[in-house]
Image (cartoon, helix red, strand yellow):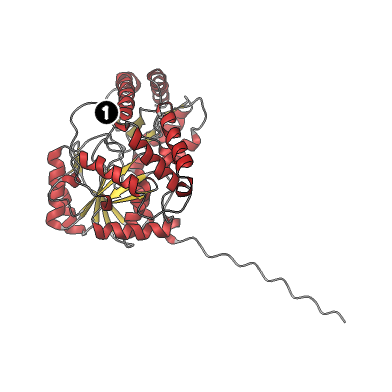
Amino acid sequence: MTLPSAPAPASASVPPLALRARATGGSPVRDILAVTARPEVINFAGGLPAPELFDREGVAAAFRHVLEETPGRALQYATTEGEPALRELLARRTAARGLPTDVDDLLVTTGSQQALSLLATALLDPGDTVLVEDPCYLAALQVFGLAGARVVAVPGDADGPDPEALADLVVRERPKLLYTVPTFQNPTGRTLPAERRAALASVAARHGLWIVEDDPYGELRYEGERVPWIAAHPDAGDRTVLLGSFSKVMAPGLRLGWLRAPAELRRACAVAKQAADLHTPTVNQLAAARYLAVSDLDAHVARVAAVYRERRDAMLAGLPRALPEGSVWNRPEGGMFLWARLPETYDTGALLPRVVQEDVAYVPGAPFHAGPPDRSTLRLCFVTQTPEEIGEGLRRLGRGLRGAV
């Protein structure tokens, strides 16, 4: 006699993703770039350095040297803090720009984006409050959101976050940190003047607050005088983390950044990095150190900045014809981005699909806001295309905006 077989057990569902993963979306810029990847699109959306300006020969020679002369070291594991030769050269560059720095003050990271993630791990518990500029760098908002932080925008003006508003928020919200890109900010291109930086440092000193000063664009100055880092202000020395990167001045594909921080926080970030990736790729660090030792990075940056200035000027020249009457925009003294505000009846997010049909793209301004968004704003990157391409792109943008209303 054959017994009936038991029914196969139903397949159980796997456990859900972590709440932070479910609650945090992707990057709107990355989503836009995926949609506009067609080669015929003139893309003002991405923050991409111009690839034709990379020092390909200099970087290739640096890699060849380290692989031929020190292959065992270049291809081996390394310390979490970073290669001493690279940190020594970074310390010298930082000190030469007015901020005394020792090798042990620095932690090399896999791009400055990782530095943000490490700081979030070291400083933030779920529910902690973070203060940010308004508008703010998108990927920073993503990092803080993934950490479970409550993100609050500091009201400000053309010179950046308002110090009095910051002080009020610190008292009311008890935040852990203020995040700022004070020089050629992403997305607005604005630069905080020295007086505003001093005022922010003073608030941090009086009320107890970390300042995370992100400086990926500061060397790309086209005009005007350099403004000292917040980290160099006497009130801020023991509470400011300075982030740097080679992505905009050497090559983003190297994924090399660094953070300068007080000892206790730097050690906590090193422990977080051990858990994340052990260390930044050794061969990339040694190649960058070799490049700094034998090449003139400052001269290379000056050449890049001269080209970028022409491209900025081409965009500024074409905007009056491209944007609708009543629009306003800034004139950045450096960096990669220009910020524009159209008349309030325009919604740049809703208009983007129509504009993309003209084979041109920008980033709508709304996602850059931690608070109520300004939907009439947009960000334009001016460094990736030639002046001729920028002119054509702005003509397409004008057609798209006119055809959408």
Q: Position of residue 339 (x, y in %)?
A: 30, 32
Helix, strand or loop under label 1: strand
Residue displayed at 50% across by 35% down:
35
Q: Nearer the viewer, residue 303 or 51?
A: 303
Q: Nearer the viewer, residue 298 or 189?
A: 298
Residue displayed at 35% across by 39% down:
246
Q: Nearer the viewer, residue 118 or 327?
A: 118
| Residue at the extreme front of the image, as rendered | 69
Above or below, comparing residue 3 to residue 339 in the picture: below
Q: Quadrant of residue 222?
A: top left
Quarter of the image that includes the C terminus: top left
Q: Position of residue 138 (x, y in %)?
A: 35, 44
Q: Which residue is mark 1?
A: 329
The answer to whether residue 242 is seen in the rendering is: yes
| Residue at the extreme bottom of the image, as rendered | 1
Q: Quadrant of residue 209?
A: bottom left
Left or right for 384, reference 259: right
Q: Position of residue 149 (x, y in %)?
A: 32, 57
Q: Position of residue 106 (x, y in %)?
A: 29, 50
| Residue at the extreme right of the image, as rendered | 1
The answer to whether residue 361 is seen in the rendering is: no
Residue displayed at 44% across by 30% down:
56
Quarter of the image that includes the N terminus: bottom right
Q: Is disc 1 surrounded by few (<14), some (14 to 19) or many (20+) residues within 10 Å?
A: some
Q: Quadrant of residue 86?
A: top left
Above or below, comparing residue 149 to residue 323 in the picture: below
Q: How many marks?
A: 1
Residue displayed at 38% across by 44% down:
256
Above or below, comparing residue 72 to residue 360 in the picture: below
Amino acid type at mark 1: Trp
